[in-house]
Image (cartoon, helix red, strand yellow):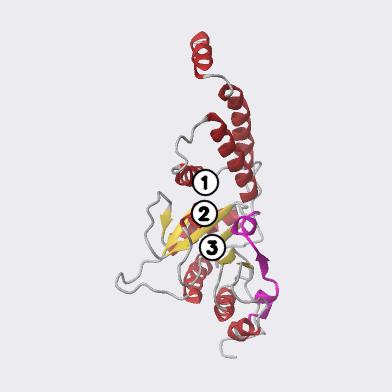
Amino acid sequence: MTGTDHTKKSIIGGPSIILVEPQLAENIGAAARAMLNCGLNKLIIVNPREKFPNPKADAMSAGADNVLKDAKIFSSIEDAIDGFNRVYATTARPREMIVNEVTPRIAAVDMKNAWRDGDEVSIMFGPEASGLTNDHIALADTVISVPLNPAYSSLNLAQAVLIISYEWFAVAKEMSIANRVNNDSRPAKKNELNKFFIRFESALDKSGFFRSSDMRPSMIRNLRIMLQRATLTEQEIRTLHGVVSSLSGSWRETPNQLRKNLLDKS
């Protein structure tokens, strides 16, 4: 087919692409084609609406068969991002949330540096009709927003995947992906972060921090976003677990006991 030359070495390597609840199999296939155009071959699919594998996806992939064949399927987004250190979320609409929001080009440079430092990187794309929810966004470290005509900024799924993937490819082309640095304290993986979040939130529940049950979900979301902006390492997560363990003893005391202990120490 036009543009395909099997005599040339394929440039493969980079972030994983996560499609969250894609509605049409054809769009999965078109996204796989866009990925392989830019040297990306790790596809993750969360709760596809249509059965997968699917011949309609194969037809639209235009030869990106291996991307589809090796795709991983998950039932939850939390499981899908479990092993990643750095997660990016794409969005086309403004959010009433405090997030790190960057353009695809800036994100590509950031991803390149994260990959070079040993991070496992992924990029999330939401359903065609509605995009990612605020809860999905809260799981990400950084939000990617594509600057387009404000009067007509609609992109289909494959177009969005191609724009982000191309920026990665353009930035990373000169980088030797094989030569990656392993630091003494590696970046924390998402499963390590999520385990800490669950423990931290449980401790806050016991302490009475969440005084309004109605506000609890948004407060938790904001706390997670704040902590993920810090790009914590494995060692820092262990330290935070120790902090929670230490403070949990104080939280079991009554307010008067805690106040007295603090005064005695001062």
Q: Give the image quarter of residue 70.
A: bottom right
First in sequence: mark 1 vs mark 3: 3
Q: Is residue 102 above or below residue 169?
A: above
In the picture, the disc for residue 214 is: none
Residue 72 painted magenta: yes
Do the CB atoms of the residues marked 1 and 2 lie less than 8 Å apart? Answer: yes
Do the CB atoms of the residues marked 2 and 3 lie less than 8 Å apart? Answer: yes
List x then y, in percent, for residue 123: 54, 62
* Residue pointed to by mark 3: 124
Q: Is residue 100 left or right of residue 62?
A: left
The single residue placed furthest to the bottom in the displayed view is 1
Residue 226 painted magenta: no
Q: Is residue 24 left or right of residue 185?
A: left
Closer to the camera, 117 or 104? 104
List x then y, in percent, for residue 262: 50, 14
**10 Å neighbourhood of mark 3: few (<14), some, or many (≥20)?**
many
Residue at 50% in and 19% down: 255
* Label 1 SS: helix
Residue at 59% in and 79% down: 25
Q: Is residue 170 left or right of residue 40?
A: left
* Residue pointed to by mark 2: 140
First in sequence: mark 1 vs mark 2: 2
Q: Is residue 61 left or right of residue 104?
A: right
* Label 3 SS: strand
Kind of residue sitting beneath label 3: Met
Instruction: Report how far apart the C-alphas of labels 2 and 3 lie in the structure.
Output: 8 Å
Residue at 59% in and 59% down: 77
* Residue pointed to by mark 1: 228
Instruction: Report how far apart the C-alphas of labels 1 and 2 lie in the structure.
Output: 7 Å
Magenta region:
63-82
